[in-house]
Image (tube, helix red, strand yellow):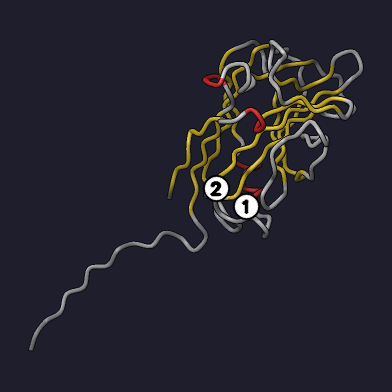
Amino acid sequence: MATWGPTQIADTNNDCDETGGFVNISGTDADGDWFGEYTGPYYSTGLRWPSVPIAAGDTITSATLDLYITYGEANTNCRAYGVLEANPGVWTETPDRGPDDVTVGTVYVAISPDGTGWKSYDVTTVIQDICNNTSRVANNALAIAIKPQTGVSTGLSSSQDYGRNASLAAKLTIVYTAAGGTILPMMMQHHGG
């Protein structure tokens, strides 16, 4: 069993928000990366780590996503999904490439912060869904999209963006066993004779 992380977002183009086809990676918004719904437009957040050691077939024991919530409404009915790309690229404003522009899995975890500060979410099933993708290769990028739940009244929340405060950017921790198990050292003894 191995542990990767906690590893924090480490570049401004590795977290973003998107609404109405417009991607914001600059972190210029005082409250960070938005997710949820505000008087009509829906917001999604994209998070990306450029080199994660998990591969197709690995078993995920646990995975935790830590978000520093800068604005949190209790009725923010959102879901975190794994991005099902072998090596997800960075988020970009031109051309738009954000969390609404990628293929995500069907497995999700509810994200509904209440209040502000650090909040932890168990994303074990989401990361396992990424590992179930046979094109996944160790040390490629890994991405998560946080999207509003459709058809349900939802509030609006935001997590800290790397561009605003790098020390409060999202963190991910994964405990996993590589496919094929763990190789243990053997001790051999030779008897002369």
Residue nearest the viewer, comparing 41 with 51: 51
Q: Is residue 36 left or right of residue 162?
A: right
Mark 2: which secondary structure?
A: strand
Report the amino acid beneath label 1.
Cys
Give the farthest residue toward the bottom: 193
Query: Can you see residue 52?
Result: yes
Residue nearest the viewer, comparing 75 with 98: 98
Can you tell which quarter of the image residue 98 is in? top right
Report the amino acid beneath label 2.
Ile
For the C terminus, the image quarter is: bottom left
Residue nearest the viewer, comparing 100 with 134: 100
Rendered location of residue 93, percent (x, y): 79, 31
Q: Is residue 191 above or below residue 71?
A: below
* Label located before the other in sequence (1 or 2): 2
Give the farthest residue toward the front: 94
Q: At 53% across and 30% down in the image, what residue appears?
A: 8
- The residue under label 1 is 131
Rendered location of residue 160, percent (x, y): 63, 18
**Residue contact at pointers 1 and 2, CB within 8 angstroms:** yes
- Residue 60 is tagged as 2
Mark 1: which secondary structure?
A: helix
Q: At 59% across and 58% down in the image, what residue appears?
A: 57
Q: Is residue 61 above or below residue 120?
A: below
Can you tell which quarter of the image residue 71 is in? top right
Q: At 52% across and 60% down in the image, what residue appears?
A: 179
